[in-house]
Image: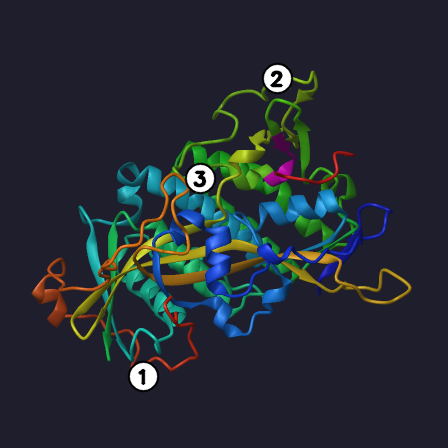
Amino acid sequence: MPVTFNVFSHPATVVPEPAPSERVIDAQRLLESACYEQAKQCGELLQSSLDDGIQLAALRASQNGFVRTAVHAYNEHHNLVIRPDDVWIAILTQFNFYVNAHAEELRSHFVSHQGKKTLILDASGTRYTVDFGDLSRQMTDLIHENVVDKSLHGWILPDFTTTTPNDKTVCAVTMMATLSKYFTYVIFLRCGIPYVTLEGQKSDWESIFDRLEKLEEFGPEPAQFASMLRPILQRFISAFDGAPDVPFWKKIAHYTGGGSGPTYLSGWITAFCAWSPKGEWLGTPVGAPHPKPIMSLNGSESSGLLLDGVSYPLIDSQEIPAGYCEVDVIVVENLVEYKCLMVAGHVAMEAVRSITPTSPEGYSTDTVRPSPQWFIFVKGENMRLPSPQTPRVPSPDPPSTSGSIPDIPLALRSARYRLASQPAPEIQSTRSASNSHSGCRCC
């Protein structure tokens, strides 16, 4: 059973409606708002998890829907709901940054081949009818056949009591992205918080805790990442024993600095900001003692959290790493190649109704939760997102998104892998027709 407990005595505040310009009206808008650099490459949005009846009005786009949701709840006095899957996706996204930055030194952990091996799936349907979520999950089965560590597949893919097919897809795309330096993926188509709710069962959170040990196999930085995560998961687990560590939850996030200088984010939420998207370590240097406080330009001191002897980093609020990852996928339909990009991870915050009545009027929309999602799109110029540096100049000839497939060896085309005996079911898909921090400083 989920556990809900009180952290602060003040009531939860209602999540305000977003400004018209910030409303998530469709999957394309969410992609553009949360994943700007990737959206600039979006020539045609093929499909996303938002096709599955997600309530768009409840979503607020976010470049890191896990970290920023937690920070927003803390600053704006909203209740917070966290699932085991939310935490695991945040861990995997960070691990993805590290592996891609250290691909060659970690190669022997994952594969025995040199260079990149092409993995090919065969599917029935068109790029508008196949289930790309199901295909990404199938691709992880193919990865499993080609990695040396046969425990990797089960370690990455979640099986918590809260896990949904969407969570499995997000983690599958994350697995593909994490191993993208070793594989090329091809799909052939034949035609401050009043209340916190930890969802799932205690065993789910214990499962995440047990999975942390494997991180230590990949080097000193992942080992330190695991050491930052353990005190957090231990307290998540203890909450199910009726002993929530309220002081711990009051240390989830804290802003210091400001004025004419940078604003720093501290608190245990920064454990989920261990690497930049380039795989640069953002935590305390491995083996170094807890750093001394930083003196801000306005005279205030900024220091990272020290919890159970573990040091948590200070993160410049403008440099919170993305909560999602990306991976190239080649989709081949009728021998025409479409260069696609899949993006998956924490890209939104969802506003939901209270778990318990918090006002005389009854239930209200005063609770937020991370909302992991995924997208796949054909690469091309996104005319909706002109470069801020250069004005958009209309081109008489739009860029081509298709062509021949010289990069795929003929032998591979005739020796494709089939992972499912039945064709992928048709689903309703999204098809293109043309296709400063603000918050309280009281804590």
Q: What element carries label 3?
A: helix
Residue stretch in magenta: 264-269
Q: Is residue 265 magenta?
A: yes
Q: Is mark 2 on a helix, strand or loop?
A: loop
Tag 1 and tag 3, C-beta contact below 8 Å: no
What residue is disc 1 on? 422
On residue 292, the disc is 2
C-alpha span from label 2 to label 1:
60 Å
Q: Say which label, 1 or 3, has the lower sequence index.
A: 3
From this view, report whether residue 64 is shown above or below residue 134: above
Which residue is found at the position 52% from the left and 49% from the top?
90
What residue is disc 3 on? 216
C-alpha span from label 3 to label 2:
27 Å
Task: Specify the quadrant that holds the N terminus.
Answer: bottom right
Which residue is found at the position 13% from the left and 57% from the top?
407
The x, y position of residue 162, in whole percent, is 59, 65
Of labels 3 and 2, the one closer to you: 2
Q: Tell me which corner region of the image, top left, top right, bottom left or bottom right, holds residue 119.
A: bottom left
From this view, report whether residue 261 is shown above or below residue 124: above
- Neighbor class of circle 1 (other Cα within 10 Å; few <14, some 14-19, many 20+) is few
